[in-house]
Image (cartoon, grey):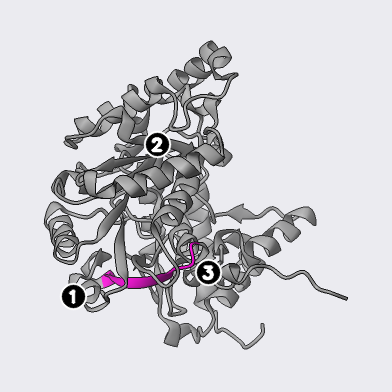
Amino acid sequence: MNLIMRSDKLKNVHSDIRGPVFVEAMRMRKAGIDVLRLNTGNPAVFGFEMPASVRNALLNNADKAVPYCDLKGMPEAREAICEYHKGKGLQGITPDDVFIGNGVSELVTMALTALLNDGDEILVPAPDYSLWTNSVYIAGAKPVHYICDEQANWFPDPDDIRAKITPRTRAIVIINPNNPTGALYPRELLETLVQIARENRLVIFSDEIYDRLVMDGLEHISTATLAPDLFVVTMNGLSKSHIICGFRCGWMVLSGAKEAASDFAAGLVQLCAMRLCANALTQLVIPAALADPESTQAMIKPGGRLYEQREATCRELDKIEGLTYVKNSAAFYLFPKLDIKKFNITDDQQFAMDYLHSKNVMIIPGRGFSWNKPDHFRIVMLPEPAVLAKAMRDLGDFLATYQQQANS
């Protein structure tokens, strides 16, 4: 038989968020076992509702989304996005610098396809959000992972970044607020990262999808505001802040040294033209959503669901011997660390499987985020506080007697 094989570009592509542990959890659910899924940031699954402003904008304007729209996106939506980023301090941009896509996922793949050639390198954080690493591979290039230091609140290590730059390095990816750690980077650190990019003539990709989900009175600083002389691509969207993951509503904004990147921008236009336009129904809600910060703010202040879910999770994690974590300042993720000697852990995927089978709770092993030690896993803090607290107590009960056995 002449076998039809997948492309070599997919050899290193992985998505553990919907990988083997997910597949096993779905098998269990099909068998009638109730599994708590802490694998993906999908708020609506846990009872979060879209804001009324978004619902009304969609229902009252649906007829406007029937035809194809501009390949970059509807003018009203791009104008609203442009004003939003100006409000964060980004200058020198116009609606023409905005590209709306079917989620940030599509736009990351498009942007890296437009930029990278075979053999190019791009700096990506570790731990990462696997979309970035996978998209680099698909573009035929090489992701080079720089370390985010857990001992320094999961902040990127500038010395490690500098040591990994080569003549082939084209760009650096900054994920802030971070997924999977929930870290929020201070201005001084961002200025250092921008200076490294400046010294090495790197394009900056700044993934800021969680910029509205910042807690504890802290402020998100947009990378591009610190780099007016560099070419920066800022990614953002409404999936998490406005509870519409299924709408696939994302965008990117080009800023800074745009003249030097005119050919790259032309490449983006080519790719946008190939898919005609992004989902037009989705774009109808962007102006209304960006004009409605109150619904998002309500979730992240004391008494709000995201805030209280974090607190409930952390209270229980504090009680578990052999587990440490850095409390998140943004988003709804934690990336705890296990004492692998205490628990004899050599395979983080097996650990996640063992916890799933024991307590019917699904987590994602650290390997799914390009973390090369079997000592971390990600928790998605989206269920109600009481549900999360029970899941963490179950984790504590599980770890109290856990010793990993080979092929258990």
Q: Nearer the viewer, residue 400 or 405?
A: 405
* Magenta stretch in the rendered image: 139-150
**Residue 13 numbered mark, or none:** none
Q: Nearer the viewer, residue 203 or 343?
A: 203
Cα–Cα gap, marks 1 and 2? 33 Å
Q: Nearer the viewer, residue 389 or 368?
A: 368
Label 1, on which residue? 159
Query: In the rendered structure, does residue 141 fall within the stretch colored magenta?
Result: yes
The quadrant the C terminus occupies is: bottom right
Apparent side of residue 239 relative to residue 126 in the rendered image (left or right) = right
Would you place residue 300 above or below residue 357 in this image? above
| Foreground label between 3 and 2 | 2
- Report the amino acid beneath label 2: Phe
What residue is at 30 percent from the left and 69 percent from the top?
Answer: 169
Would you place residue 206 above or below residue 255 in this image? below
Would you place residue 350 above or below residue 93 in this image? below
Label 3, on which residue? 397
Helix, strand or loop at disc 1? helix
Chain-order first, disc 3 or disc 1: 1
Q: Mark 1 packing: few (<14 Cα in 10 Å), some, or many (20+)?
A: few
